Amino acid sequence: MRQAQKFCWPALTMGVCYYPEQWDESLWRSDLQRMKKAGITVIRVAEFAWSKFEENEGEFTFDFFDRFLALCVEEEMQVIFSTPTATPPAWLTEKYPEVLNATKEGVLYRHGLRRHYNYNSPVYQQLCARIVEQLAIHYGQHPAIIGWQIDNELNCEVDEFYSQADDDAFRVWVRDKYQTLPELNKAWGTAFWNQGYTDWQQVHLPRPTVRGTINPHLHLDYLRFISASAVRFCTMQSEILRRHLRKGCFITTNGLFDYVDNHRMTDEALDIYSYDSYPDFAFELGRTIDHNDLNDRSWSMKLTNVRAISPNFMIMEQQSGGNGWTTRLEAPAPRPGQLTLWAMQSLAHGADCISFFRWRTSIMGTEIYWHGILDYDNRDNRRLGEVAQVGEMLRKLQPLCGAAHKAAFGVIRDYDNEWDARVDAWHGRMHDPSRWEIFEGAQRSHAPYDEVWLGMDTEVAELAKYQVLIYPHAVIMTEARAKLLEDYVQQGGTLIIGCRTGYKDATGKCVMLPQPGLLGKLSGSDVTDFTFASPAEEAPTILWDGEALPAPIFADILHPAEDTKVLACHNTSYFKGQPALTEHPYGAGRVLHWGAGFSAAAVRKLLSYTGVAEPFRDVAQLPENVELVVREKDGKQYLFVLNYKSWTETIRLQKPMKSLLSGEVRQGEVALPAYGVDVFEMN
Ligand code: GAL
């Protein structure tokens, strides 16, 4: 069973990211005072400031941050201190180029941006361990410091590693995993195209190959290795910090990036997980903006993922200005109200601390267009006004601190399938779109959901919290997971699976079983034929109760077992009229097998059929454009309504409810202005 979250914020808190090393010291005090005036009580510092502590190798100085932190004590500002390992100093990479990451072709990433190091270089590990230990010894008991951030955004910018150090470490990792060469050859299916290994020295990271295609089983292990390397790097730092930190100080890092098992990392190394939320990416130049689309609202999907790691997470970087680098990314300033809306989106989904990025826009470097709260001119502005307003709102919403998210159903995910979907284009083609369509279907039917991540130690009790679970395309299925799902269904759960379930094992090799493989007994269905939707034919649909539901990408033609009911049939192509959706009673529960990729319309219908659509319709009726989220604590439920549109939307409250924000009791039609948010006490 996963460990419970180890640190919880005692109150809803507002913070900001600050870079004392980028500003004249004469600005520090007034910056801190202005932050406090706006309601900011916590700052995150030092994640890129290695040279302020070790300008030359082995010579440690602390006076710069000593001065700054003394001021923080005076001004009663709390601090989250960071380990600065995301940006090694120039002396380090110049002297020890083996610490650098490389492209697959072996070209080293050089000094000049960030995250150009690799996790596996013994030299880098030693130098990082040393700076972290020095900082922990010097600042571990500092009265201003309440928490620590490890590194910055592990696996951001670049999430593949091809340095010599990684190649060496991969060989060790593989040997540890498989022990013998015959086992390795079996796992990687090396009988295919004569890829067998006869010596461990022949084993390498993916390297340039003809057409760039690599052995998929090796590739899947490579992604697992990247994750293991990132987790180990983080754990190494956290173990050092833990030896020196004041009791009560928490450890976190900010995510969420590919090829990191965030659950494992949080369990092993962190007390709370943080996320950097930038919904303005939805409006980046070059994107097609559909005004009726979910756009920035889709960040709720990412926040749902974050909540599955830490139920009450923190936002380390919350959007406060327009996005931009000098070389890429151009997105507009948040419209009046949007900064507040996005902060409330984070809060609704489980954040108890929201820290904005960044206090003042940088006047130098790559990110002069990544706008913070203040502009270069340092005057009070519209965005600072909104931040102060968010501070006011947090004060009124304090009863919500630590509240749990209330979900109508769950979506199962696991890292094997996440990463296999990156390795295997056939899998990937369904994986991301279905995830999106499930989110959209749930959002539009106001059925909030949680993600349930399966790990080695997941227990059935974690699944049993949900009356309905969707496991969209569990291409990889293991005996242990099949057993877990069986227990869940046996006890009364409803499991919905999609097409292409169960045709691979944990190595990514295909199993010689009828699909859905190890879930066949549970689903009472047998896939007798299957195909990609042909671009030469009409868009596939499935006919369910007279409704033709889009059934994209892939079709599984199902054959029901004797006790299995056919609910719907394919409506197109050569398999028109053949079973497409089955329902199989099993124990006290049932399994629905949907023989296609998911569409939002199909998801809505499946949620209605299984009784979890619109769970709060007796409380509030909302237009599709308004997001509904519910948090609960101490027997009380709180209803969030969020309008992401630039126009007013009208909601209907079915009973009198008090707004925590205005204090007014409202019932019936209530206008929610452009980008407006409200939070009602439901009972
Ligand atoms: C985050 C990062 C910050 C800053 C911001 C804007 O990914 O943690 O340091 O770079 O994006 O680009």
Image (cartoon, rainbow, N blue to C red):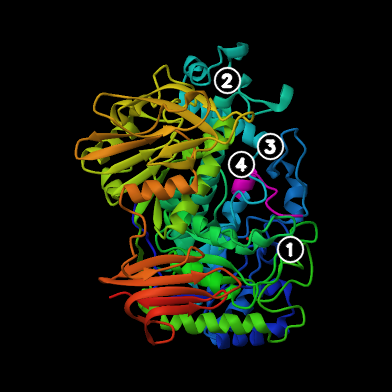
Name the N-terminal-most of marks 3 and 2.
Answer: 3
Front position in the image: 67 or 348: 348
Residue under numbered circle 2: 200
Which residue range is magenta in the image? 113-126
Horizontal side of residue 562 vs 504, given as left or right: left
Distance from Cα at disc 3 to Cα at disc 2 = 18 Å
The answer to whether any part of residue 298 appears in the image is yes
Identity, as a three-letter code, of the amino acid under mark 1:
Gly
- Viewer-closest of 534 and 317: 534
Rendering coords of residue 613 (x, y %): 36, 55
**Element assignment for label 2:** helix
Front position among marks 1 and 2: 1
Residue drawn at (57%, 46%) of the image? 258
- Circle 3 SS class: loop
Residue 633, above or below 656: above
Image quadrant of residue 131?
Answer: bottom right
Q: Residue at x 30, y 52 (%)?
A: 611
Q: Which mark is residue 122?
A: 4
The percent position of residue 414, horizontal first and vertical second, equals 44, 41
Pair 1/4: label in front:
1
Quarter of the figure that contains the C terminus: bottom left
What is the crowding at mark 4: few (fewer than 14 residues within 10 Å), some, or many (at least 20)? some
Q: Say which amino acid is labelled 3.
A: Ser
In percent of the image, x 61 and y 48: which residue is there?
Answer: 155
Q: Which residue is mark 3?
A: 163
Dot placed on the residue nearer the N-terminal end, 4 or 2? 4
Badge 1 local density, few (<14 within 10 Å), some, or many (20+)?
A: some
Q: Secondary structure at mark 4?
A: helix
Query: What distance separates the C-alpha of mark 3 from that of mark 4?
Result: 12 Å
Name the N-terminal-most of marks 1 and 2. Answer: 2
Q: Looking at the picture, does residue 381 appear above or below residue 300?
A: below
